[in-house]
Amino acid sequence: MSSSIRLSRGSTRVNMEHGWRYEPGAGNALGTLTLHNRPSLGYLQTEFPSECWNFPEVTTTVSHSLERFFLGLLSPDPRIEHVYWFSENATLKVWTVIPEPDFSLEGPLYRAQMLFIEKTGYECDFSVIYRFGKSMDDIKPQGSRQVL
Amino acid sequence: MTSNRRAVAKYSKKLSVTPPRMPARDDHLAQARHNAQFYAAVDKSAFKDWAITILFYTGLHYIDAFLAQRANLHPPIHKARDNMVTTVAELKPIAPDYFALKNGSFNARYMPPTKFTDKHVSDLETTHLARIKTEMSRYVAV
């Protein structure tokens, strides 16, 4: 980015055009990204390919996007037990947990995931997990974040 | 041509990699028929997990046959195919059926133990795979 300013090696970066400031953490610790104008996820992925998905602002953005453009398209249904997401490289992985196969429930889920992809443009990999009586500890994808 | 250019040309030729031939429409259709034969041969009640996975890969090859014919598209990974199923106009109507098969297979393979019922296996065959086959038959000779 031509408008990014790296003050010195490992020091604060400021981008005036997109309105962010990044202060690196000590050692391997995650730094702090302060956003004044919220840039697109694609832009942040380009600028911070390895750290992007873990920025609190991005985490919040992804969770809000899922709440708004995925869960928000579905009628509230207690059979939709949990929704988790995790990022792997540039892909957003989303798991929806339901008790057992039931196309009357899955059909709207699939249509909502299609609309989510169209709306956000994220590269996504959606899955529906059938719990089949297992405990949530056995089901929850490791390292994932919970939306519902 | 200078000797340097000749050397570059020589080694470029040596190092060039021929991409694998991608399966053609008819290869996918043959594989779909092969999978359907296998499905007919297995004990679906005893091996529901594998029966579901066979159904998924049968549907997948119908879709790949269509993509190969329509635009010489060959999705190399599931994510790419998911994206095409989600965005290509001819595939959108059957996307929920494709995802029902895909999720059944995903759970069968990666989330044991599963408790699929005979009815679920039958529904995947007679409703979801059947819809994919019917829709794709409008474009390719399934």
Image (tube, coloured by chain):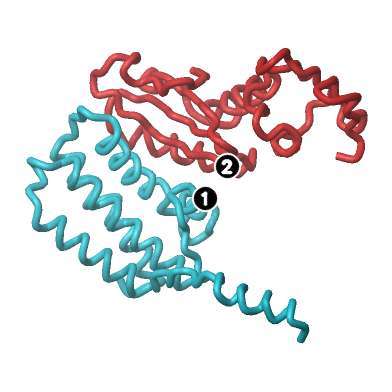
- Assign a secondary structure to mark 1: helix
Number of other residues with Cα within 10 Å of mark 2, as a class: few under 14, some 14 to 19, many 20 or more? some
Residue A116 visible in the snapshot: no
Look at label 1 and name its amino acid.
Asn
Residue shown at 44% from the left, 54% from the top = B93
**Residue A82 falls in image quadrant:** top left
- Residue A113 on image: x %, y %: 50, 38
Q: Look at the picture and state if A39 lies above or below A29.
A: below
Quadrant of the frame with the N terminus of chain B: bottom right
Front residue (pair A82, B106): B106
Question: Which residue is outermost to the front?
Answer: B3
Q: Position of residue A74 (x, y in %)?
A: 49, 29
Q: Which chain is cyan?
A: B
Q: Chain of mark 1?
A: B
* Residues under numbered marks 1 and 2 in contact, where contact means CB atoms less than 8 Å apart: yes
Q: Which mark is residue B55?
A: none
List x then y, in percent, for residue A130.
Answer: 30, 28
- Taking the image as shown, residue B80 lies to the left or right of residue B54, namely right
Disc number for residue B83: 1
Q: Is residue B11 left or right of residue B136?
A: right
Rendered position, A67 above or below B131? above
Q: Is residue B15 visible?
A: yes
> Could you tell me which chain the residue with mark 2 belongs to?
A
Q: How many marks?
A: 2
The quadrant of the picture occupied by the C terminus of chain B is bottom left
Specify whether A26 is left or right of A92. right
Tell me what residue is drawn at x 64 percent, y 38 percent: A120
Residue at x 23% of width, y 66% of height: B33
Chain A drawing hue: red
Kind of residue sitting beneath label 2: Glu
- Picture quadrant where residue B37 is located: bottom left
Q: Is residue A82 left or right of A37 when viewed as pictured?
A: left
